[in-house]
């Protein structure tokens, strides 16, 4: 069971490291790779991408391209943090379910 304490720990970890809190399962049979795509958000893949992803615009460029020019840098950071928390929660839930799946950042 995931708790609010875990969410608090994940949020604190993300603020310190700018990375999701991804615990490793005791056994790993499959790896999910996550990629940050400004066009669609975070992408999960069962294998590494074999082509280079398109260049990622800055948050400001992304918001302007989406017609959300009024967003502030603080808003962008909150959205980014929420995505990283989601990855942390997904990994924790996979471990909770005793699924041998590990989430790693794609390169």
Image: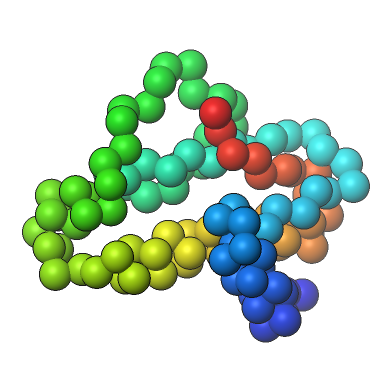
Q: Position of residue 49 (x, y in %)?
A: 49, 23
- Residue 48, image quadrant: top right
How is the rendered protein coloured?
Answer: rainbow
List the single residue furthest toward the right. Answer: 26
Q: Quadrant of the N terminus?
A: bottom right
Position of residue 54 relative to residue 103, above or below, is: above
Q: Is residue 84 visible?
A: yes
Position of residue 84 relative to residue 12, above or below, is: above
Q: From the viewer's perspective, is 91 left or right of 58?
A: right
Which residue corresponds to the image point at 56% horizontal and 56% vertical from the top-left? 18
- Residue 4, image quadrant: bottom right
Q: Quadrant of the C terminus?
A: top right
Which residue corresponds to the image point at 37% horizontal and 42% vertical from the top-left? 37
Which residue corresponds to the image point at 59% horizontal and 26% vertical from the top-left? 47
Which residue corresponds to the image point at 48% horizontal and 16% vertical from the top-left? 50
List the single residue furthest toward the bottom. Answer: 4
Q: From the viewer's perspective, is 30 left or right of 90?
A: right
Q: From the viewer's perspective, is 36 left or right of 104?
A: left
């Amino acid at each position: 069971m995931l708790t609010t304490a875990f969410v608090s720990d994940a949020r604190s970890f993300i603020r310190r490291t700018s990375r999701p809190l991804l615990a490793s399962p005791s056994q790993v049979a499959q790896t999910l790779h996550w990629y940050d795509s400004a066009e669609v958000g975070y992408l999960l893949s069962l294998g590494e991408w074999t082509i280079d992803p398109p260049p990622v615009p800055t948050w400001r460029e992304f918001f302007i391209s989406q017609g959300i020019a009024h967003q502030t840098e603080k808003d962008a950071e909150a959205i980014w943090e929420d995505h990283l928390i989601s990855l942390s929660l997904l990994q924790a839930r996979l471990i909770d379910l005793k699924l041998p799946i590990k989430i790693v950042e794609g390169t």
